[in-house]
Amino acid sequence: MGGQYNFVAISNELPDSHSILMMKSYHISHGKKSSNIVWSHEQITIPRHLRDIVITEYGIAALKGKSDEDVIKSLIEISDSEFQSELV
């Protein structure tokens, strides 16, 4: 684990602040394109109560205070269109 958790946790404690995490919506490994937006990952470091803003090349998802269902919808909207139906 790096400093990502600390960055997000500190932002949550400061008044009028936001944590903004930027990422590419996909990656290419061994010639295969895969989504970076996934529902299960073995190394999740940000708990639900600290999620805030995620940005990809397809847009911005404001997640703070949203239900799991609304978070999923928001993340699908900023995923690569090639993977949206699979994520749904």
Image: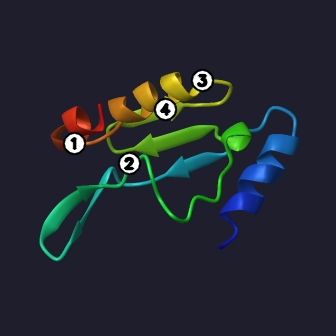
- Give, as a three-letter code, the residue at label 3: Ser
Residue bearing the label numbered 3? 67
Disc 4 target residue = 61
Label 4 – label 1 distance at C-alpha: 17 Å
Indicate the secondary structure of the residue bearing disc 1.
helix
Q: Residue at x 79, y 51 (%)?
A: 9
Q: Secondary structure at mark 4?
A: strand
In screen coordinates, is 74 left or right of 67? left
Q: Nearer the viewer, mark 4 or mark 3?
A: 3
Of the numbered discs 3 and 1, the one sitting upstream in the chain is 3
* Pick the front one: 22 or 1: 1
Of mark 3 and mark 2, the one earlier in the sequence is 2
Q: Is residue 9 left or right of residue 43?
A: right
Numbered tag placed on residue 37 in the rendering: 2
- Pinpoint residue 66: horizontal percent, then vertical percent: 61, 23
The image position of residue 44, as x and y in percent, is: 58, 58
Kindly identify the residue that appears in the image at 77 percent across and 38 percent down.
17
Contact, mark 2 vs mark 1 (Cβ under 8 Å) = yes
Q: Quadrant of the C terminus?
A: top left
Q: Residue at x 68, y 48 (%)?
A: 47
In the rendering, which numbered label is found on residue 6?
Answer: none
Q: Amino acid at mark 2?
A: Ile
Mark 3, secondary structure of its residue: loop
Of 34 and 40, which appears nearest the observer?
A: 40
Q: CA distance from mark 4 to mark 3?
A: 13 Å
> Residue under circle 1?
83
Q: Earlier in the sequence, mark 2 or mark 1?
A: 2
- How far apart marks 3 and 1 lie (CA) works out to 22 Å
Q: First in sequence, mark 2 or 4: give its number.
A: 2
In the image, residue 37 lies at what x, y percent? Answer: 38, 48
